[in-house]
Amino acid sequence: MPDISSSLFWIAGGMLLTDPVMPVAVSASIPYAHYVFAITGALLVVLVGKWLGSRRTPPKAVELSAEAVNPKP
C-alpha cells in the first residue's frame, strides 16, 4: 500500500507547483523545484505511514501446542 499512496503524493507534490495559488517565485527560486516537491510529498506519506504503523500494538502470541488445548490431568 505505501507504493500506491507514495506515488500518488509524488504526482500531487509535482502538481503543487502548477497550482494557480502557488507563487511563481517559489518554483523560480528553488532549483529542480518539481523534483523537490514530488520527493517531499512521497517521503511524507512513507514517514507518516511508518509512524502510524509503529504505534500499533503487536498481536498477542497464541499457544499452538496440544497440551495447551488439552491439558493432562
Image: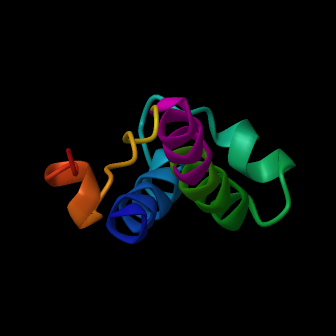
In which quadrant of the rendered image does the N terminus lie?
A: bottom left
Bounds of the magenta span? 46-56
x, y (%) of residue 48? 55, 38
Q: Is residue 70 left or right of residue 39?
A: left
Q: Residue at x 16, y 52 (%)?
A: 69
The reply to whether the magenta stretch includes residue 10 is: no
x, y (%) of residue 67? 26, 58
Secondary structure predominantly adopted by residues drawn in magenta: helix
Q: Residue at x 57, y 38 (%)?
A: 54
Q: Nearer the viewer, residue 60 or 24?
A: 60
What number of labels is visible?
0
x, y (%) of residue 11? 42, 63
Q: Nearer the viewer, residue 48 or 9?
A: 48
Q: Is residue 2 left or right of residue 42?
A: left
Against 3, is 48 above or below? above
Q: Nearer the viewer, residue 20 or 48?
A: 48
Q: Is residue 4 left or right of residue 13?
A: left
Q: Residue at x 55, y 57 (%)?
A: 42
x, y (%) of residue 5? 36, 58
